[in-house]
Image (cartoon, helix red, strand yellow):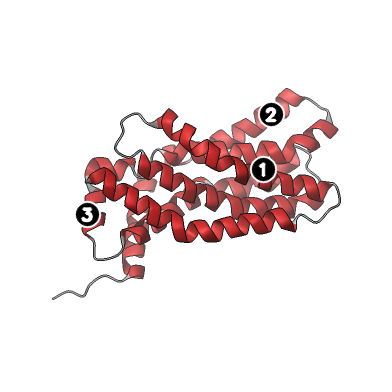
């Protein structure tokens, strides 16, 4: 008789499955990060050679590109599993559904947003962001983008039973994303003025801690309602 899977065992199995599927469609997987890079490059070209303007808008542009990259991939978070019946298997698994949702969301963040974070120093250099503000920008993105993914997981779970829910998903997610965007980009602006940006970063950290607990449970409840 085989032993029941543990939390870590089920997580490693789900991560391995997701990475195999991601490798098979690696061209599609890079689309969110490439889209975000294109947004930043187009902003830089549109604003011309005015270095002062580029520096002023750089935090906002980089944060908006991160938000758009997350939104672009949000519809795929649970859609494929709902269509091939994997979500029903998740509900029957001997581990909490919220745990599997958390693992899936972490993989989604690591494969869609983490490449953008790695490219952020180069993109910030392209926009002329002062290097002294780069640590604040990276800290805000490191705290804010996982929070965006967790909030997006709840919205994706709520719309899982709907076909062609892309626009609706964006309309539902954007109001939740706005405070994260404001505190993230605002922290860099506050640092640029010579003030302490830790207030905005602490609010992002608090939001991330709360979302790590509440978002997987909420998304799991939404999945159960949608599938039942």
| Circle 3 crowding by C-alpha within 10 Å: few under 14, some 14–19, many from 20 | few
Which comes sooner in the sequence, label 2 or label 3? 2
Q: Is residue 78 above or below residue 172?
A: below
> How far across and down, in percent of the image, does residue 148 sit?
53, 47
Residue 165 visible from this viewpoint:
yes
> How far across and down, in percent of the image, does residue 66 sit?
59, 41
Q: Nearer the viewer, mark 3 or mark 1?
A: 1
Indicate which disc residue 43 carries.
Answer: 2
Instruction: Identify the residue position indicated by label 1 in the image.
Output: 182
Q: Nearer the viewer, mark 1 or mark 2?
A: 1
Query: Based on the displayed image, in which of its 4 quarters is residue 158 positioned?
Result: top left
Q: Residue at x 31, y 58 (%)?
A: 97
Q: CA distance from mark 3 to mark 1?
A: 39 Å
Q: Secondary structure at mark 1?
A: helix
Q: Is residue 127 above or below residue 20?
A: above
Q: Nearer the viewer, mark 2 or mark 3?
A: 3
| Circle 2 crowding by C-alpha within 10 Å: few under 14, some 14–19, many from 20 | some
Q: Secondary structure at mark 3?
A: helix
Q: Secondary structure at mark 2?
A: helix
- Across the whole image, how many numbered discs are drawn on residues? 3
Foreground residue, 178 or 39?
Answer: 178
Query: Based on the displayed image, in which of its 4 quarters is residue 102 positioned?
Result: bottom left
Instruction: Identify the residue position indicated by label 3 in the image.
Output: 89
Q: CA distance from mark 2 to mark 3?
A: 44 Å
Q: CA distance from mark 1 to mark 2?
A: 19 Å
Q: Residue furthest left?
A: 1
User: Mark 1 near mark 2, Cβ–Cβ under 8 Å?
Assistant: no
Q: Is residue 102 above or below residue 78?
A: below
Position of 81 compared to 28: left or right? left
Residue 131 visible from this viewpoint:
no
Position of 50 compared to 121: left or right? right
Position of 168 compared to 126: left or right? left
């Amino acid at each position: 008789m085989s032993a029941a899977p543990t939390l870590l065992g089920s997580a490693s199995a789900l991560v391995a499955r997701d990475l195999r599927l991601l490798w098979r469609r690696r061209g599609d997987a890079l689309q969110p990060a490439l889209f975000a890079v294109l947004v930043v490059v187009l902003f830089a070209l549109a604003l011309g050679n005015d270095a002062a303007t580029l520096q002023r808008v750089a935090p906002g542009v980089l944060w908006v590109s991160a938000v758009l990259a997350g939104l672009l991939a949000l519809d795929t978070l649970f859609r494929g599993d709902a269509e091939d019946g994997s979500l029903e298997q998740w509900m029957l698994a001997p581990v909490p559904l919220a745990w599997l949702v958390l693992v899936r969301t972490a993989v989604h963040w690591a494969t869609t947003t983490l490449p953008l974070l790695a490219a952020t120093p180069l993109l910030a250099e392209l926009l002329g962001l002062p290097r002294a503000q780069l640590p604040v920008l990276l800290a805000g993105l490191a705290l804010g983008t996982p929070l965006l993914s967790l909030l997006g997981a709840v919205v994706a779970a709520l719309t899982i039973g709907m076909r062609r829910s892309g626009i609706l998903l964006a309309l539902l997610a954007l109001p939740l994303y706005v405070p994260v965007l404001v505190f993230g980009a605002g922290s860099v602006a506050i640092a640029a003025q010579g003030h302490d940006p830790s207030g905005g970063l602490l609010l992002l950290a608090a939001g991330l801690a709360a979302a790590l607990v509440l978002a997987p449970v909420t998304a799991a409840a939404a999945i159960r309602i949608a599938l039942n």
